[in-house]
Amino acid sequence: MKQHGSRQWLGIVSYFVVALVCGPASAQGHPRSGTSDVPFDFYIAGNKMPAGQYTLDIVAPTYVTIRSKDGKLQQDLYFFQTASPGKNPESKLLFSLRDGTYYFSGISSWLGKSQLTSFTPHPGDQIKEVPLVPVEKDVAKPAGSL
């Protein structure tokens, strides 16, 4: 019975820590979406994705969706952070080249550097960086005053 209460307390504390950490990040006006032209076929968790333009949307700091330009392919991506953000970082998609095949392996952005949870790096992997261009969402602005 005591263990159930401890889990509930841990869940409440975790919620507030996430809200405290994520709240300021989302309030700073950083882009929550980006596009990238990937010039090669690649794999995500065993699923082949063809070369082309993709849109990434940040749902949460560790949860992103990737969608092909035509909307036919979409995948949920889960990450864990491997490095803190630097000053004015460029956003990039990270791919690992292994035995002539590219694998989506991570992302580098204003949130820091993160690794895809379904990817396991190998020592011989070569990293290919592809720019991720932030997409600013248009926010409706009020019309002139009356």
Image: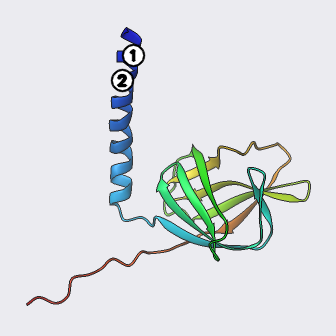
Q: Quadrant of residue 72?
A: bottom right
Q: Which residue is mark 2?
A: 8
| Residue that extends furthest to the right in the rendered view of this protein | 99
Q: Which residue is mark 1?
A: 4
Residue at 39% across, 33% down: 14
Position of residue 40 measured from the top left corner of the image (x, y, whole percent):
80, 70
112 displayed left or right of 39: left
Q: Secondary structure at mark 2?
A: helix
Q: Tags 1 and 2 in contact by the CB under 8 Å rule?
A: yes
* Numbered circles on residues, count: 2
Q: Quadrant of the C terminus?
A: bottom left
Position of residue 131 measured from the top left corner of the image (x, y, whole percent):
64, 70
| Residue that extends furthest to the front in the rendered view of this protein | 72
Q: Quadrant of residue 80?
A: top right
Question: Looking at the picture, which amino acid does disc 2 mark?
Answer: Gln
Position of residue 56 measured from the top left corner of the image (x, y, whole percent):
57, 65
Is any part of residue 110 visible from this angle?
Answer: no
Q: CA distance from mark 1 to mark 2?
A: 6 Å
44 displayed left or right of 99: left
**12, 92: nearer the viewer:** 12
**107, 77: nearer the viewer:** 77
Neighbor class of circle 1 (other Cα within 10 Å; few <14, some 14-19, many 20+) is few
